[in-house]
Amino acid sequence: MEERKYAATDAGFHEGIEKMLALETDPKEYIHHFSCFTGHVNLSRYLFFYECYKKTVDLCGHIADIGTWKGASFFFFAKLVRLFEEQCQTQVHGFDWFQGMAPDSERDNPVHEGTYKADYEKVLELVRIQGLEGLAFVHKLDLVTELGAFFADKRQMRFKMVFLDCGSAAVLESSMEHFWPRLVNGGVLMLDHYNNACSPSESEVIERYIGDRPMMQMPFARQPSAYVIK
């Protein structure tokens, strides 16, 4: 089981966090010198994002972040676009209903009930503070029932990279129904919980859409757990 495989590493990491917090560091240092404090597992997550992004930088299309929560991956993608695609039309679109997890009792992991609830207005304010309007867009909607209406007047919208981080079978199914056809050929679909008990239905849902395309991993990263190139 994954929990046992990483138990010692995770215990040491969280113990280290408590020791670092006891140093009473100026909060500005967490921003300006983040690499002094972030763990290697968390850092590997962003390297995964970057390596996938590099595969798409020459493709035409937007980036979708599904399950935005507090915006960590969403803002990272937006800043990559600002760095590497200043003259391109690429936008980053975050999707979340900002009400936390509501797992299906039969298909989802029940331990996540009520978790991952975030402040929508705070995410919007971070967009404004950092001058990302026109590049980064946050959509507060129910991905199960409202994606069809969202795309109804956006027939032109295509994506070159889609990150699925939701852990809900219903959200996964609706997201794949609407985003997979809009992912351009050569585009990358990233999955946070493929082959992972955190989201029991994810592997089955995804495999109904991707056909015989190989499911790839980054050997240095725990999560996201996989990606597939369309």
Image (cartoon, rainbow, N blue to C red):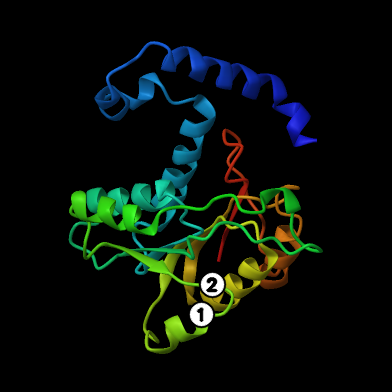
Task: Please say if 23 is above or below 117.
Answer: above
Task: Please say if 182 is above or below 123.
Answer: below
99 or 9, which lies in front?
A: 99
Is 130 positioned to the left or the right of 194 in the image? Answer: left
Residue at x 57% of width, y 22% of height: 14
Q: Which residue is mark 2?
A: 143
Local crowd size for mark 2, using a 10 Å CA cut-off: few (<14), some (14–19), many (≥20): many
158 or 124, which lies in front?
A: 124
Question: Where is residue 145 drawn, in percent x and y?
Answer: 57, 79
Q: Is residue 177 visible?
A: yes
Q: Quadrant of the C terminus?
A: bottom right
Q: Is residue 212 visible?
A: no
Q: Is label 2 in contact with label 1 (beta carbons under 8 Å)? A: yes
Judging from the image, what secondary structure is the residue with disc 1 in?
Answer: loop
Is 159 positioned to the left or the right of 85 in the image? Answer: right
**Residue type indicated by callout 2:** Leu
Q: Which mark is residue 146?
A: 1
Q: Quadrant of the N terminus?
A: top right
70 or 80, which lies in front?
A: 70
Residue at x 26% of width, y 54% of height: 125
Residue at x 50% of width, y 26% of height: 40
Residue at x 33% of width, y 58% of height: 121
Question: Where is residue 78 drawn, in percent x and y?
Answer: 31, 53
**Residue type indicated by callout 1:** Glu
